[in-house]
Amino acid sequence: MRFILVLFIACLTPLSANALDVFACEPEWGSLVQELAGDKAAITVATTAFQDPHRLQAKPSLIAAMRGADLVVCTGADLEIGWLPLLLRRAGSANVQPGSTGYFLAADFVRKLEVPTLIDRSQGDIHPQGNPHVHLDPRNLRRISTALEQRLAAIDPANAAHYESRLTDFQARWAAAIETWEERAAGLSGLRVATNHRSFSYLAAWLDINVVATLEPRPGIPASGAQLATLLEQLSPNPPAAVLRTPYSNERPAIWLSERLDIPEVTLPYTVGGTTGAVDLFRLFDETISMLQELSE
């Protein structure tokens, strides 16, 4: 049911007869397209909050959706490097190949964190362009939405005024929401947490949260029992407030460490659909901040 709800996000509103076909790699971009396009877009979302966006099988249904797309919206920064190039090749549509107007990578429009100075695959799943989880800083979404509206207008100039109007409305609501979120999260500054993966770096940077440990010894490499034991020894004198993880990550390492440190293991929504309440981008951040506030009380 979760997959169906996310995949058909565009069905929340009636579609116009000449709606654009948009292929979104992740739920956050499907939600953003919905904000900007409304009934002018039919949106297929390839993944859910419960699937690792680093890894996806190129199923025939996704190939067909890609083949018929007018616009592909993905994160980029090599997040989908393991499956998106294959999907594009098999779809074979010139309209959405890299370099075309129909190919949009959100991470191209923001400053990336954790850009490595040395590329060495022995260090794990290193992203040469930096940390790709850019959507968890809402200020990035403000920049990305502007670029995405311009791309929608370029592909569908007949509806350019529609996209511009919806962007203006979204930007106003988003700016007000960011102000509210920052007021609510003021008490989170300095909160110490551990994370399973570097999924929350942008969220932490935005809210001034201190990530004191990452369970993975190297990005994408699960921690061994010995490595977790070492981490337990290091954190025991001053435990963090919680261990944070995404809905798609392996829960066992986070639970193991949280039980031994006697701290909560918290599954943040990470993206749209990650909890029952995180039904769109606004509720995603509402829910995330509420969950973090419980740790600081």
Image: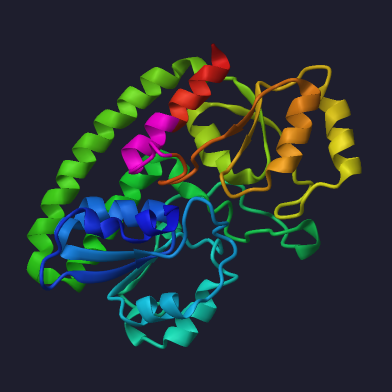
Provide the residue span drawn in magenta: 276-287
Colour convention of the picture: rainbow
Q: Residue furthest right?
A: 226
Query: Does residue 205 sit above or below 101 in this rendering?
Result: above
**Residue in the picture at 44% in, 21% down:** 185
**Residue in the picture at 43% in, 51% down:** 110
* Residue 279 is a magenta residue: yes
Q: Quadrant of residue 16?
A: bottom left
Residue 98 visible in the current orientation: no
Q: Quadrant of the N terminus?
A: bottom left
Taking 92 as reference, is 208 left or right? right
Q: Position of residue 70 (x, y in %)?
A: 27, 75
Q: Quadrant of residue 117?
A: bottom right
Q: Position of residue 262 (x, y in %)?
A: 75, 20
Q: Residue furthest front?
A: 1
Q: Nearer the viewer, residue 41 or 234?
A: 41
Taking 12 as reference, is 14 left or right? left
Q: Quadrant of the C terminus?
A: top right
Query: Does residue 136 sit above or below 153 in this rendering?
Result: above
Q: Position of residue 84 (x, y in %)?
A: 51, 73
